[in-house]
Image (cartoon, rainbow, N blue to C red):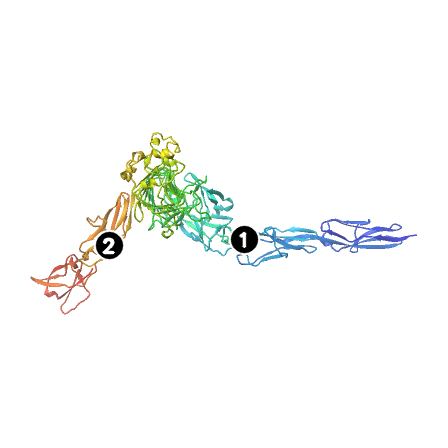
Amino acid sequence: GDVAPGITGPTDQTVVQTSNATFTASVSGLPLPTVQWRVNGANIPGATSSSLTLTNVQFSQNGFVYSLVASNSAGQATNSATLYVLVPPVISQQPTNLSVIAGSAALFNVGASGVPAVKYQWSKNSSPIANATNASYTIASVSGADNGAIFSVTVTNSVGLVASSNATLTVLSTMTGSFLPTNNATGISPDQQLRIVFSSTPKIGSGKLYVRDASNDSLFATIDTSLFQTFTMFGATITNAYVRTVQGANYFYMPIATYGNEAWITISNRFAYNKTYYVNADAGLFLDSANASFPAITGTNTWRFSTKPSGPATPTASTGLTSLTVALDGAGDFATLQGAADWIPQNNTLLRTITIQPGVYRDNTTFAQSRHKVRVIGAGANRQAVQLFYPYPAFSSANGAGTLRLESNDLYVRNVTIDNAVYSNYNGVTFAGPIQTVQTTGSRLIFDNVLIKGGQDTLYTISGITYFNRCEIWGSVDFIYGAALTVFDQCDIVEIRDTGGPITAPNTDLAAPYGLTFLSCNFPRALTANGYPYNVGTGNTTFQRPWRQDGYTAIINCALGSQITTKGWAEWDGRETTCRAREYGTTLIGGGSTTPAQRQAAGAYWLNTIDPDYVNNSSLDPTNSLLYGASGQANRTNVTVNPADYTLAAIFGNSYFNLGGWLPTTLPTITTQPTNKTVSAGSPASFSVAAYGLPDPAFQWRKNGTNISFATNATFSIASAKLGDNGTYSVIVSNAAGTLTSSNAVLTIPALPTSITPTFTNGALNLSWPVNQTGYRLLAQTNPPNVGLTTNWQPVVGSNATNQVSIAMNPAAGSVFFRLVYP
């Protein structure tokens, strides 16, 4: 007979969303039952087999009940199973970048879901963070160590894993900054460097700085730290460099550099005149000492400035302005010496003067391409007031270029300091190596009252003719060197490294009659108490080691400190046998002297001597046995050092140099100004001025702006001062190089109480007063009878030029009153 349906299965199914699920069952009965699948009690069309496959299952089907109904003539049976859908983790809201002030809290969030419930694991810079297992992660107090950190979260459950996108934490510094030029400043020079003065010491971070034209928001210049180049100068590695072209040569420069609490920003292209610009910068371009980011500079009116309406007209080689001013604050024609130097025309023939106002200028400068006949004058009260500072000047080849490089002729530099600070700790390096402060190749160059600071290779006079007058030069090793004729006149030459070293390293041509020549110079021992960076030991410094075999150094009438060794001169790979070392008239600072014989006895056998074998055959190698060793030393002959050969006229007049009678001249310098004087009438009075120059200056004293006849000495005297000598005195100091006027000094001769002596002669009233009161004025008033004194005083003409007057009397006029006044 018939058998009612029987069903085995289906069973519950668990699948991952988007997967397929299959329910299966077996059916029995007679006759063979028909089957129908249902979902949640509703027939599924076409589902009439013993298995049911669901494709692309979605979480919306989770918990659905799938049933199989089997039917025949004997009856009906139903079996059911449940579908369970699992969902891999899905992130609906990614964590986002945060910018948070240092010390504040930072909160990262993620939105995620999944079945079964998801779990979280936050990471910092790809490393899991302990106990960071919630949908949010909080840093209670961020610090600079967190700046730039990358945060992410991994979301997991039993069926999957998903990683969030990265979120960057920017920690904003509490460091503040003020802008120079100030916001909305006007009158800015085209070569203006930008500065930010921070409240603490900054570091260069990463990002971009943008300068835009305010008229249309177009990009004028960009500095991108990712494009910085790196170069090495001996012990120093510079990582913040770009390359620019200056007067035909390519140089490294630092578009952003930090000095103390300041950042200096150098734009290689010049601003246009009569334009307005604004500056933006990314957060993190600058960092504080804890590595927190200086906030972004945004907007069009946060740091905005306008340039001058116009500038100096473009000159020709023989026309145009002859006077320019450089000033940091926009008060000059240019803001950098290089900007002014670039304005000077090539092949210049017109004497021009660049006056630099006081300040620290952080850029290197080149005078090249025949920019001749220029005076660079520091306008400060002393040479420290104007400082030209740049730490690692280099060509794009990384060869040294000098903080100041002079390739042109007839240049005159006065009253400035030039410094590369290689002797101090800069970016973690001290005495980085042979990095030049000044390089010269020009002819007829003059440095007057200039302080040049450096370490090894401070001054490299490569070629040409250079004269230093009353300058001071710092260094450590071979810090004055080169092949040029270089004369140091009344200069201070200072070894500053505590362990000493050789001062000069000449490579003079054999035919040159002079090389590095020191006349009446001081070589003081450096001590920190005297303003030098280190205390230099005693007996550790020498005048020369010969860089090339014919090098020539002469020390004439100089005074030495105790740092100079008894030997005084040093060897270098045998080249001392052919070098020229000359010394004469040496004295010791503090008293005493030393002689060439003492130095020779200490081992400097080549001092003031020459080897005849080398004179006869200059092709001999310095270490040839004819020159070197005991036999060579025994063969040397003395050279007479005649001080008459070491005058400026003898040196620069030597026909070898072909200078056509040129001698160095320096502007007058007043070292002591005349001062105010107060003396009694009849006493002597004098004013004095102390000044120097090359040639020696002449003097012309003036009173109240008018020349005083025959007053042409450094001192002006009045044997017996009269009231008429009261006035303002000054002196014009002049020589062939120029003219300088002293400050004013006032002579005061106090007026003393005096009396008028009357006498009568032939009806005339004679009034007189002491002769030393000449300069007083006699006042008179005539009033009707019975009228006393009024205020109607009138001067008696000419009375201030004498001490007596005669007045005709008219009794009918009434009463006449007189008095003396001064002035």
Relative image position of residue 52 (x, y in whole percent): 79, 49
What secondary structure is marked by label 2?
A: strand
Q: Is residue 107 above or below residue 520?
A: below
Report the amino acid beneath label 2: Thr
Number of numbered labels in the structure image: 2
Relative image position of residue 104 (x, y in whole percent): 54, 59
Residue 348 vs residue 530, the one in the foreground: 530
Q: Which residue is mark 2?
A: 728
**Reading the chain from its start, which is encountered first: label 1 or label 2?**
1
Nearer to us of marks 1 and 2 is: 1
**Residue at the (49%, 43%) spot, across then down:** 229
- Is residue 726 at all visible to an observer of this figure? yes
Would you say 679 lies left or right of 548 here? left
Identity of the residue furthest to the bottom in this view:
786
Residue 153 vs residue 277, the one in the foreground: 153
Residue 541 vs residue 397, the one in the foreground: 541
Q: Quadrant of residue 806?
A: bottom left
What secondary structure is marked by label 1?
A: loop
Real-space CA distance between mark 1 and mark 2, rounded to the nearest whole angstrom: 66 Å
Relative image position of residue 162 (x, y in whole percent): 65, 51
Report the amino acid beneath label 1: Asn
Identity of the residue furthest to the left in this view:
762
Query: Quadrant location of the C terminus?
Result: bottom left
Crowdedness near tag 2: few (<14), some (14–19) or many (≥20) residues, C-alpha within 10 Å: some
Check residue 147 in the rendering and tell me which mark sits there, or answer none: 1
Residue 186 vs residue 776, the one in the foreground: 776
Q: Is residue 711 above or below residue 583?
A: below
- Is residue 460 at all visible to an observer of this figure? no
Relative image position of residue 528 (x, y in whole percent): 38, 51
Crowdedness near tag 1: few (<14), some (14–19) or many (≥20) residues, C-alpha within 10 Å: many
Callouts 1 and 2 close, C-beta under 8 Å: no
Check residue 711 in the rendering and tell me which mark sits there, or answer none: none
